[in-house]
């Protein structure tokens, strides 16, 4: 019998050896609050329109999709406003693919990308996957970015790409626009403001979209996975200068966005009042969750997103496991001693509170 081949036996790239894949557990438990999804499924009316759109597209599936997703991009541009048009908007299979295309076009061997940690774990994974060196900058104790220190770090490392996540995952921290403006001015290369959670930011928080005019090296990414409640559709998008989109056309795979994905995303946009209508509820539930956790004497990061980072637990894994044993899945992510809970329905949040209270109360 031949021995089982392991990864180490394969002629895999040296820079991938010893790495761990992205791995949010997908565990089938009653209350799943670990991947920042929107807990509200599409309404029956939306599901019916989706079915109709798929039926309509079904008869054309012998043909490749619109390679440039022109109609969808025009509708996304209209949704984003800020004077955007289809030539300034790009779409791909989730914002992760958008980010990967950015790395393929602007990163690569001999180049580097920098982010300010703790932040979204896929930024370094996508970066190293594109054979690009990852430079880890740091956030402050309150999870904000100190502009002086960040400018100094950018000047020291001169990264080809700077990631700014606002609101940040896993901390929920939104960046003040002055900070974004300063870092865009300081960066020698591209700046990606990852606004996956922008719609959940507290009222009045400006988007980096406002900084696009006059900043051709700025890219703002968004997703339909969170506020739009369409994580299963896999649709991410960006806004940038048309020249940036020309660069992405050089690396994207032809026909990367399937006919069905484009159709589903367009239906979601048509129903955006319904989908985005949940945002207010989720914000209120988030703020209630923050208040409840603080009321229990826990440390809680201010959140402008649909999740809350809380701690500090010397043995966070034990707390995570205790909650899982009570049917509630949260996420072990971010700095040691902290856990992250995605905001769910009122019922799910009640289950979260019960489970955490149970765990903190200790064994019966
Ligand atoms: N950016 C951030 C900050 C995220 O947290 C996520 C998903 N967790 C993404 C991008 C990617 O989302 P998607 O690929 O579903 O658009």
Image (cartoon, rainbow, N blue to C red):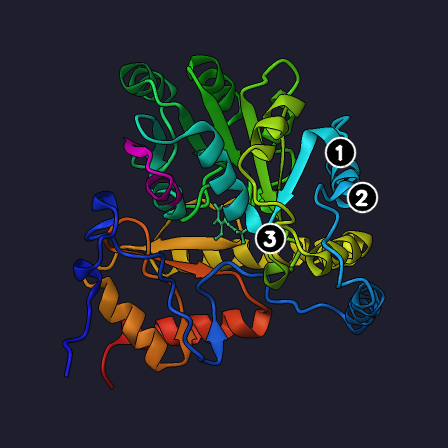
Q: Which mark is residue 86?
A: 1
Q: Decide: few, some or many residues near mark 2? Use Cα within 10 Å; few <14, some 14-19, many ≥20.
A: some
Q: Residue at x 44, y 19 (%)?
A: 189
| In this rendering, position of residue 310 left or right of residue 4 | right
Q: Quadrant of residue 196?
A: top right
| In this rendering, position of residue 74 left or right of residue 38 | right
Depth check, mark 2 against mark 3: the one in front is 2
Q: Which residues are magenta?
A: 126-139
* Mark earlier in primary sequence (1, 2): 2
Q: Secondary structure at mark 1?
A: helix
* Mark earlier in primary sequence (1, 3): 1
Q: Residue at x 35, y 76 (%)?
A: 324
Image quarter in which the N terminus is found: bottom left
Residue 32 on the magenta segment: no
Residue 46: x and y in percent read 79, 66
> From mark 1 to mark 3, how far is it between C-alphas?
30 Å
| In this rendering, position of residue 328 left or right of residue 137 | right
Q: Quadrant of residue 157?
A: top left
> From mark 2 to mark 3, how far is it between C-alphas?
31 Å
Residue 175 shows up from this direction: no
Residue 145: x and y in percent read 38, 29
Residue 207 in the image: above or below residue 126 = above
Residue tagged by mark 2? 71
Between residues 272 and 319, which one lies in front from this camera angle? Answer: 272
Q: Secondary structure at mark 3?
A: helix
């Amino acid at each position: 019998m031949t021995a089982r081949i392991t990864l180490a036996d394969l002629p895999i790239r040296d820079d991938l050896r010893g790495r761990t894949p992205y791995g949010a557990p997908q565990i089938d438990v009653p209350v799943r609050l670990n991947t920042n999804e929107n807990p509200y499924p599409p309404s029956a009316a939306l599901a019916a329109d989706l079915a109709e759109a798929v039926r309509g597209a079904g008869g054309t599936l012998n043909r490749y999709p619109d390679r440039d997703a022109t109609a969808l991009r025009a509708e996304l541009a209209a949704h984003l406003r800020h004077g955007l048009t289809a030539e300034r908007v790009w779409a791909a299979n989730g914002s992760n693919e958008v980010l990967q295309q950015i790395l393929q076009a602007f990163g690569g061997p001999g180049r580097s990308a920098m982010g300010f940690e703790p932040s979204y774990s896929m930024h370094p994974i996508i970066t190293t996957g594109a054979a690009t060196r990852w430079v880890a900058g740091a956030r402050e104790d309150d999870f904000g970015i100190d502009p002086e220190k960040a400018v100094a770090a950018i000047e020291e490392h001169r990264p080809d790409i700077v990631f700014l996540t606002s609101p940040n995952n896993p901390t929920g921290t939104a960046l003040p626009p002055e900070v974004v403006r300063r870092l865009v001015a300081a960066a020698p290369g591209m700046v990606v403001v990852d606004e996956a959670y922008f719609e959940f930011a507290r009222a009045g928080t400006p988007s980096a979209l406002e900084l696009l005019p006059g900043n051709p090296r700025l890219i703002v990414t968004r997703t339909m996975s969170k506020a739009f409640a369409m994580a299963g559709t896999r649709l991410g998008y960006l806004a940038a200068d048309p020249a940036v989109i020309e660069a992405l056309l050089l690396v994207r795979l032809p026909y990367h966005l399937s006919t069905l994905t484009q159709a589903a995303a367009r239906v979601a946009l048509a129903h955006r009042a319904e989908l985005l209508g949940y945002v207010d509820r989720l914000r209120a539930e988030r703020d209630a969750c923050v208040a409840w956790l603080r009321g229990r004497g826990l440390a809680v990061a201010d959140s402008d997103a649909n999740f809350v980072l809380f701690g500090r637990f010397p043995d966070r894994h034990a707390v995570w496991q205790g909650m899982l044993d009570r049917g509630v899945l949260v996420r072990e992510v971010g700095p040691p001693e902290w856990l992250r809970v995605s905001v769910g329905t009122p019922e799910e949040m009640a289950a979260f509170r019960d489970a955490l209270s149970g765990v903190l109360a200790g064994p019966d």
